[in-house]
Amino acid sequence: MLKLTAAVATALFVTASPLAYAQTATTAQSDHPSAADLKKLTDLRIDLIKAALQMTPDQTKLWPPVENAIRARAEGRQARLAKIRETMGKRAEESRSEVLENRDPIAFMQRRAEALSQRSADLNKLAEAWQPLYKTLSPEQRKRMAALAIFVFHDMSDAIERRRAEAEEDE
């Protein structure tokens, strides 16, 4: 069964990765995944988690708050990315020297702090939603969840590293 779960995870991330990473800081706004594409990606991730956990009927009753928290977190991320694209779109018309002249490091730090605060709140809500279900998971389900989490965190760290490299190139 673990082989099946690994195969499903690999297939999902192989098909979803191009969609998730198709965007770069220098692409046009039309190159970004649509809201429907991002919703589909969230649906795939949710389906992957459900398939990996193979929940019992009693555990399935505890699933809706987890799914809602996952979706809310994805929507929050999409809203933050849309806000960044909007800001970048406004600055696209400015020359590089104008962008440097008009930088406001204090406003940047405040926007960044607000975004991090929102991400923290979303993550706390997700952890709270998971807690009742996690308590009911069998040792085998916890192993599958841990393996999936390691895979996802590794994938996320790669994406973060790429973004940092792109940001350094832009500066």
Image (cartoon, helix red, strand yellow):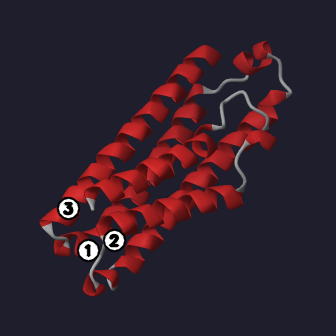
Please give left or right for residue 40 compared with residue 148 in the image.
Answer: right
Q: Which residue is drawn at 59% across and 35% down?
A: 107
Element under disc 3: helix
Q: Position of residue 93 (x, y in %)?
A: 86, 27
Residue 143, placed above or below residue 19 = below
Tags 3 and 1 touching, CB below 8 Å? no
The answer to whether residue 121 is visible is yes
For the C terminus, which image quadrant? top right
The crowd level at tag 2 (other Cα within 10 Å; few <14, some 14-19, many 20+) is many
Closer to the camera: disc 2 or disc 1? Answer: 1
Q: Position of residue 127 (x, y in %)?
A: 31, 63
Closer to the camera: disc 3 or disc 1? Answer: 3
Of the pair 10 and 100, the residue shown nearer to us: 10
Q: Residue at x 73, y 17 (%)?
A: 101
Indicate the amino acid at tag 2: Ala
Element under disc 2: helix
Please give left or right for residue 142 compared with residue 34 in the image.
Answer: left
Q: Where is residue 1 in the image (x, y as percent from the top left)?
A: 27, 62
Q: How far apart are marks 3 and 1 (CA)?
A: 11 Å
The crowd level at tag 1 (other Cα within 10 Å; few <14, some 14-19, many 20+) is some
Residue 14, placed above or below residue 95 = below
Please give left or right for residue 171 compared with residue 123 in the image.
Answer: right
Q: Where is residue 2 in the image (x, y as percent from the top left)?
A: 27, 57
Indicate the amino acid at tag 1: Leu
Query: Where does label 1 land, which residue?
Result: 133
Q: In which quarter of the image is residue 90?
A: top right
Query: Where does label 3 land, which residue?
Result: 142
Query: Where does label 2 land, which residue?
Result: 129
